[in-house]
Amino acid sequence: MTAQEERRGRASRRAVVPWYPGRGHPTSEGPAAGLSPGGTSEGALVRPYTLTRGRVRPSAAGPRLDLITIVVAARDRRERPLEPECRAILELCRRPISVAEVSARLDIPLTVVRVLLGDLLADGDIRTRAATPVSRLPEKKVLQAVLDGIRRL
Amino acid sequence: MASADSETRPGETEAIPQAVKIIIAGGFGAGKTTMVASVSEITPLSTEEVMTEASYGIDDLGGVEDKTTTTVALDFGRITVNPDVVLYLFGTPGQDRFWFMWDELAEGALGAVILADTRRLETCFHAVDFFERRGVPFAVAVNRFEGAEDYDTEEVRRALDVDAAVPIVLADARDRASCRDVLVALVTHVIRGRSPALSG
């Protein structure tokens, strides 16, 4: 009841647009889920920045979200109403996943995904690997692991 | 202020793997996406970056909806190296006008593969210049297309004017084993570059 009311309250701040989780690109797990041919495509009509209420970058306070920053849903997050696209993100983040993959699988532009992930991070809904400075290159031990992994291809 | 403890909780943090990336560069049609597909454990994904000219340097898009927006697609694949390390392979956008994306791609990259098409060798000159200037280690993979004249790697090295230490490998972007050899050559080169005693 309360959640329902709250959700309605939140949604009224902008037009309610249906969201189709997983209407992204085909993956190894199968063809793109979501919109079937001939199905309704209202979801695709959302202007990307409507989702972020006009913001084009995440809040400056949070850690930097690179293309390959790995995010994962926090296990102890508080259940509360969220925008549909944020719920879709959390669903994907049940296992660690990169920012680029979240963007590709949900078909949300990177810039927009960064803002939404920044919000979720600030609210404690997701965690990210302790930030390593962008300029720092992978350690020798990581490089060796990569080399070993590639050799097994 | 309460600091975000979500990042510092011990035990849980270790479960998040470290991600590294390799860039696959080359001219339009050089075989970048083909190579990514050959080695990726997932069907290559495509993500979009929407660039708004007016969005540079300001925080709000309000009132600038009429400015030009450009959508750049980035193709990428993934190789789970082990439970702690994930390797991502990103293809560079093919067209020259998307150069602005290269900076972001190059940031923190482990290294790059430049796919050279011997029918149009000049199309990878830009990439060679870019990675040399940025100090990103790279290997050149000469993708052998049917109907192309055969060049040996030294001819390509001279034509591209790259350092003797840069690996140049003949490759077939469609072939997994061949792409593996290219990546092994690159990562070996990267590791060697980190150990001063072995350089040269």
Image: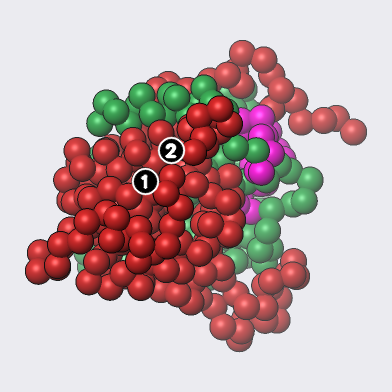
Residues tagged 1 and 2 counted as in contact (Cβ below 8 A): yes
Which chain: green?
Answer: A
User: In the visual, does B88 lie left or right of A33?
Assistant: right
Q: Residue at x 67, y 15 (%)?
A: B10
Q: Label 1: few (<14), some or many (≥20) within 10 Å?
A: many
Q: Are marks 1 and 2 on the same chain?
A: yes
Q: Residue at x 60, y 75 (%)?
A: B52
Disc 2 marks a residue whose amino acid type is His
Which chain: red?
Answer: B
Q: Toward the viewer: B135 or A132?
A: B135
Q: Toward the viewer: A15 or A71?
A: A71
Q: Toward the viewer: A131 or A101?
A: A131
User: Dot 1 falls on which chain?
Assistant: B
1 or 2: tag closer to the N-terminus: 1
Instruction: Determine whether B113 is above or below B97 in the image.
Output: above
- Residue ID for mark 1: B167
Specify the segment rendered in magenta.
Answer: A110-135
Which disc is residue B6 wearing? none
Q: Quadrant of residue B59?
A: bottom right
Disc 1 marks a residue whose amino acid type is Pro
Q: Label 2: few (<14), some or many (≥20) within 10 Å?
A: some
- Residue ID for mark 2: B189
